[in-house]
Image (cartoon, helix red, strand yellow):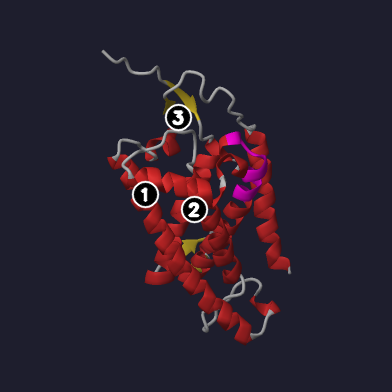
Amino acid sequence: MKQDSPRHTVVVWDLPTRLFHWSLALCFALLWATGEVGGLDFVVPLPGGKTWFITNMDLHMWLGQAVLALVVFRVLWGLWGSSPSRFRSFVRGPGAAYRHFVQLMRGAVPAGIGHNPAGGLAIVAMLVLLFLQAGTGLFANDEIYSEGPLAHLVSSEISTRLTDLHGAVFDVLLAFVALHVAAVLYYLLRGKNLIAPMLHGRQTLPAAGEGATLYHAPLTRALLFFGAAVLAVWSLHWW
């Protein structure tokens, strides 16, 4: 009788990576709501009987800048963060991604720690698109009374073109999100749950020694990187 290989559980995704993932997902959903649906205007009561009216576009722009800060943080964390989150641990080139796809088409679900080669390329592409999306939003305008914090640095014609590009990139991002959800569901149907590890951080591995060399960066470094990212984005308002 064939015995199952020993399995053990290790923490793969640290807290900063998980918070980044779900914060980005929430911001993206709200950006879609404020950009495509609208109507999210609301009034915030202030002391002294005063009120603060926040428009739908105000919220959209704040969310866009939050995404930009998250992307900057993820780049820093991808360079100097925990080992499973570093780019060098999962960016392995198109050849490795192709071989991974071939295995999937044959019905196999390759085992491994963290992101697979195909997912790694998708993450890099997603970060580039998000940076482009948020970056063009800084120069965009709604042709009424709202504009990005850097729109005054370019002509109205360039701002309009960047606004059009802003909308086009968002459509591409929607396609990427749909592909991401489809991939997660496919793996789930094949018996590999990718959602749970991104919630609690733990992953069950087949070999007892696998995952023993994982490095988890200190939380203080993540806080430092996040603070630097927020300050960098906030400083754009003084350009």
Q: In the displayed structure, does residue 49 sit left or right of residue 215?
A: left
107 and 197: which one is in front?
Answer: 107
Q: Secondary structure at mark 1?
A: helix
Q: In the displayed image of the protein, which residue is found farthest to the right?
A: 239
Amino acid at the residue labelled 1: Ala
Q: Report how far apart the C-alphas of labels 3 and 1 lie in the structure.
A: 20 Å
N-terminal label among 3 and 1? 1
In the displayed structure, would residue 102 be above or below residue 196?
Answer: below
At x 48%, y 73%, the residue is 167
Q: Secondary structure at mark 2?
A: helix
At x 34%, y 42%, the residue is 187
Q: Quadrant of residue 84?
A: top right
Q: Which mark is residue 202?
A: 3
At x 28%, y 41%, the residue is 189
Q: Which mark is residue 183?
A: 1
Mark nearer the viewer, 3 or 2: 2
Residue marked by disc 2: 122
Mark nearer the viewer, 3 or 1: 1
97 and 219: which one is in front?
Answer: 97
Q: Position of residue 239 (x, y in %)?
A: 73, 69
In the displayed structure, would residue 117 be above or below residue 65?
Answer: above
- For the record, the magenta segment spans 73-83
Q: Which mark is residue 24?
A: none
Q: Residues within 10 Å of mark 1 (few under 14, many from 20)?
A: some
Q: Residues within 10 Å of mark 2 (few under 14, many from 20)?
A: some
Provide the major secondary structure of the magenta segment. Answer: helix
Q: In the displayed structure, does residue 232 sit left or right of residue 130?
A: right
110 and 163: which one is in front?
Answer: 110
Q: Position of residue 178 (x, y in %)?
A: 37, 58
Q: How many marks?
A: 3
